[in-house]
Amino acid sequence: MPMASGWETDGRWRIDGAFNWGNSAFVQEASDEALYVDAETRELRVTIGRAVSDRWAVQLQLPYRYTGAGNLDSFIDSWHDFFGLPEGERPNMPRDQFRLAYERDETLVFDYTDSREGLADVSLDVGYRWISTPDATVAAWLSLKLPTGDSDDLTGSGATDIALTLAGERRFGDVWSAYGQFSITALGEGDLLPAQQRDFVISGLAGLGVNVWRGLELKVQFDAHSAAFEDTTLDYLGDTVLLTVGGAWKYQSGWQLDFGVSEDIVVEGSPDVVFVLGMSRRAGR
């Protein structure tokens, strides 16, 4: 989800809940390495934050993640057939099973076959609103991700990361809007493939929204990030580009419902499909 480029300054807390449900199934091989991925991921991320002044805001992100077997395989197969999307090795893999394995230089580095879940890495974010006009907002965020998850349970990296993000939005009248975000993250030494991990990752997104009816806004968004690992030719460990189509429904009561579906543009470079559902509301004093 994009970081906010603007926020209310009335002192009230804002609570956001986002649920991401993803599914991947593929096998990638190179001369000296191989990756087997057949997994379903579900993450519930709760974000609590508020403005502390006209320009400053703070928030805490609390994610809970499940990685394992699931029941989306049949639906994803039908999804790909309906839209004519490539399926890779998916039709040849067992249904609703879990395995995540990586082999390098004929050595099995890891092989997970049991589902696992737990609290993932939490993030503390501090935002500074740089520009705020009726038509445009720009904010900078400094984020500290803490290793509260467990790498053995696939809920954390085992490292502390620091990220700097610049987020902006521009509205064109009452109908159209455009938004974007650019981030650079300094990675601490994680537990997963530490010898191949890079020191920095660059990521960004760009989106376009259109208000089609009352509180209903439809959006299209592109996300991309650079590879977190080096010395590999496998697509899943390389650069990633995602397309998300969805929108938001704003209720008069103050609630907002966000929804979307993401598809990998770089085939087998990220989860095949991710379904996104979010709810947010400003709490009372």
Image (tube, helix red, strand yellow):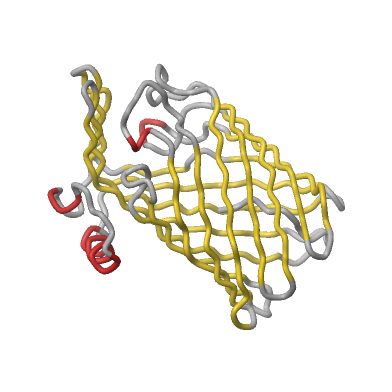
Q: Position of residue 171 (x, y in %)?
A: 72, 65
Whether 119 is drawn above or below 45: the answer is above
Which is more toward the observer, 121 or 135? 135
**Within the image, what quadrant is residue 165 found in?**
top right
State left or right for residue 211 relative to residue 188: right
Q: Residue furthest right?
A: 54
* Residue in the picture at 59% in, 32% down: 185
* Residue in the picture at 59% in, 77% down: 216
Q: Position of residue 161 (x, y in %)?
A: 58, 30
State left or right for residue 71 relative to residue 237: left
| Count of marks overlaid on the render | 0
Q: Position of residue 153 (x, y in %)?
A: 36, 36
* Residue in the picture at 74% in, 73% down: 173
**Within the image, what quadrant is residue 156 found in?**
top left
**Within the image, what quadrant is residue 217 found in?**
bottom right
Q: Position of residue 180 (x, y in %)?
A: 63, 52
Q: Residue furthest bottom?
A: 213
Whether 216 is drawn above or below 244: the answer is below
State left or right for residue 66 relative to residue 27: right
Which is more toward the observer, 77 or 22? 77
Which is more toward the observer, 141 or 112? 141
- Quarter of the picture containing the C terminus is bottom right
Whether 182 is drawn above or below 262: the answer is above
Whether 51 is drawn above or below 202: the answer is below
